[in-house]
Amino acid sequence: MAKEKKQPRPKAETPKGFRDYFGAEVTHRAEMLRTIASVYHRYGFDALESSAVETVEALGKFLPDVDRPNEGVFAWQEAEEGDKKGDWLALRYDMTAPLARVYAQHRNDLPTPYRRYTMGPVWRNEKPGPGRFRQFYQCDADTVGTASMAADAEICAMLADTLEAVGIARGDYLIRVNNRKVLNGVLESMGLSDEHQRAAVLRTIDKFDKVGEAGVRELLGKGRLDDSGAYIDGVGLSALQSDPVVAFLTSKGFDNGFTLANLRRAVGGSEIGAAGVDELDQISTLLAAQGYGPDRIVIDPSVVRGLGYYTGPVFEAELTFEILDEKGRKRQFGSVAGGGRYDDLVKRFTGQEVPATGISIGVDRLLAALHAKGRMSTVEHGPVVVTVMDRDRMADYQAMVAELRNAGIRAEVYLGNPKNFGNQLKYADRRNSPVAVIAGGDEFDAGKVQIKDLILGAKIAENATLEEWKDRPSQYEVQRSELVEKVRAILDGQDG
Amino acid sequence: MAKEKKQPRPKAETPKGFRDYFGAEVTHRAEMLRTIASVYHRYGFDALESSAVETVEALGKFLPDVDRPNEGVFAWQEAEEGDKKGDWLALRYDMTAPLARVYAQHRNDLPTPYRRYTMGPVWRNEKPGPGRFRQFYQCDADTVGTASMAADAEICAMLADTLEAVGIARGDYLIRVNNRKVLNGVLESMGLSDEHQRAAVLRTIDKFDKVGEAGVRELLGKGRLDDSGAYIDGVGLSALQSDPVVAFLTSKGFDNGFTLANLRRAVGGSEIGAAGVDELDQISTLLAAQGYGPDRIVIDPSVVRGLGYYTGPVFEAELTFEILDEKGRKRQFGSVAGGGRYDDLVKRFTGQEVPATGISIGVDRLLAALHAKGRMSTVEHGPVVVTVMDRDRMADYQAMVAELRNAGIRAEVYLGNPKNFGNQLKYADRRNSPVAVIAGGDEFDAGKVQIKDLILGAKIAENATLEEWKDRPSQYEVQRSELVEKVRAILDGQDG
């Protein structure tokens, strides 16, 4: 703790866009991360924890979706040493850029292929908004050093297993797989070689989720009147030219076989397009061999998120159940994880191309989904509270609590000012305690102790005096020697 | 991943003083943190995860042991907004300064007293050295809002339970307790009111561990010739004046009762000194009532670390067994945790005094201790590796690995280039795999599969060709349908 100075008092506030997490928020996330890690581990992935701080140089100075250097990260310059200027350092903004640095740095000591998982906070220097924080958790798994589609299929299978392990039932999620090469093939078969026009088509494809087939046709053609009334200029393609793009986006068929056949038509004679379809075919076959059918993982060319960023297969996990949004409207929960293949990961550092593929789970969104489905209780029982009727007997109360703890029961002595007994009950209430233990002079003389079931008696207790409270049927007088046994019986009853 | 730019290649290096953690380094720490959290939780402490970033203002601009503002932290200034200057933000350097901010910010929503634990990295902008990193883990528990010595006693008992829970045997550790007020009483009874002289005495006391009783006497008096030959000026006290300080430092007696009697003599008529001895007496009594004797927690006035920083009781946990240092010399392992009472925690923010006490465990040191004692294996078995003899049968290999994983066995398919089978064996070796599964055309035709016990066969396998290797007795041919059963039998045998 810092010493006091004669200065105006500092504000007790997190910096803007940051927050603290309390109690069950912390432990539920820790449990989820543990569960995810156990699945990743079972798949042969090894843990990695890279430093939270990287050189700006190693991070690459910009976020995946931000093209301006030095934007989007928290960065600072180290102090000079002699006449050597200090390095610029920054907090990591994702787990992929550090993986590239780690792999390039340690590649001679790491197995190839290298399967690694990592979990922890990342930081974004962005304008915070409601529910949008500048520090949040990511939980990634990547396989570095293999071009085999078996790595991509494995990532998808692992993602399905992970979602089920954390409590998303089969049928409540769908992992959709697309491929950037197929899209490139479509663009090639359209004869679109102009870089600007290709970028415009890519941007349009990104809007497919929002505007649908007709909207995409308009945007590829002459343009479209926005919902806001603004006119959005089109790419200027003819209807015929637009056909392959629309065919690509809408090629999802009755099963993976139909979808793949549709895609083969959509890419026409393009070599890269055919390679992309072959990759999807391999993934589909490998997954089928492991028993992952299209009810869990499906080829779906309408997945467009990340198509601009990745170089091959792209994955997205969506939760398909409906929840009520903050305005009480039903909507699909949506995406909780995404990833894909990015084959020039390490090249920045070493000049060598190193193929890699991976997935990132949005842990906080997944937690929110489980809460929304009622699959994770937001209420956590507090400890058993041993109240203090006689402050001179603190050693006796401590002995009680030690017995309870030694029996594995979460318990504590009330450590505030014991004068006002009502405050002790309020404290137990605020702690959501399941049981209170009460002993004063009479009880000690008789070798007894009072045990109060607070779950049963919670509402009554809140505004009652001690005397009323002691007469409730949810309170028991037992022998001091039976303390642990009786408390455990009440706790077991509450759980049941 | 960042896009490539035409720039010189970035260096693939962590910033100076930072490092990465791999595999078992990560999972062992995670296990230890989980164990510690479960003890803290049993004691009624609630989890807290505060943001890693704080305003420099809230942190107090300086480290506990560094008196210069803006030193020791990684800090940066936010961008301006309009004509409002950006806030200075910084990474937390410990868990106590953020706790003060959190408690001041949320005090109306938190129970009083508030017991909280927290674990995570902290960052120090200091010159790195061998084994000294600028990012490391802390694992803290504090009780805020009570002046009761029961809180301090509880922290000590919890620390003892925690050390035993993570694998430090009773007898291999000792928690030593001292009290700043006793020292203040000693200084008062000496009539030392000059601030500079008191500070000089405090600095001298800090050297007791190193120079012993005779050294302290010299330093309190005329001065002392250093080991390096330099002469250190003394405080200038007479031998008589020095007596109470030496009496304080050497007052540890046969048991806590003797020690407390010695301390009462050392503080003379000082009121604050007597209050300090009373506090130690209470802690001793409360701990005895819970069954924590001086074999685990002992009053020891020779504990001087932190005496300048804390305001009341001070705790230190030491591991008492000997290890060999890097030069092969025997030495005591030493301190793994420390803490104490600091009663002006929240005052900087609110003006109100809020008593608090707590402990911080050096997780990385504790891990090192367990490794040194051989109580934590540094070697972790890798996954079962399903090798690839025929790349066209990848779907079959994936089916095998899926069966193993579904049975809860850690397993993976070799995803590198399968052409050179020797590379696959080298890979399995590097992964420290317990078992390899091998199946080529012959095996598939016969409905069989080869299973190789790699722990048994590791050394032989390393330089042998496939043909030699297949003939070893540690390799079995089994029915394809018996794959899971047989692999499990080998793994169980390896564990036993």
Image (spheres, coloured by chain):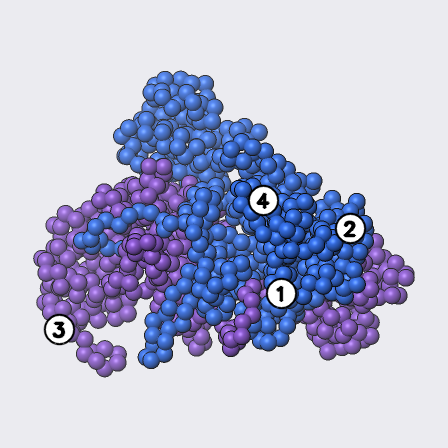
Chain colours: A blue, B purple
Give the structural element (helix, strand or loop) at label 2: helix
Q: Secondary structure at mark 1?
A: helix
Q: Which residue is mark 2?
A: A259
Q: Nearer the viewer, residue B48 or B287?
A: B48
Which residue position is annotated with label 1? A195
* A175 in relation to B438, above or below: above
Q: Name the amino acid type tagged 3.
A: Lys
Local SS, label 4: strand
- In depth, the one of A341 and B222 nearer the eye is A341
A332 to the left or right of B175? right
**Residue topped by disc 3:** B222
Q: Quadrant of the C terminus of chain B?
A: bottom right
Callout 3 secondary element: loop
Amino acid at the residue labelled 1: Glu
Q: How many marks?
A: 4
From the image, tell me which residue sits under label 4: A225
- Residue at point 74%, 54% (across, down): A240
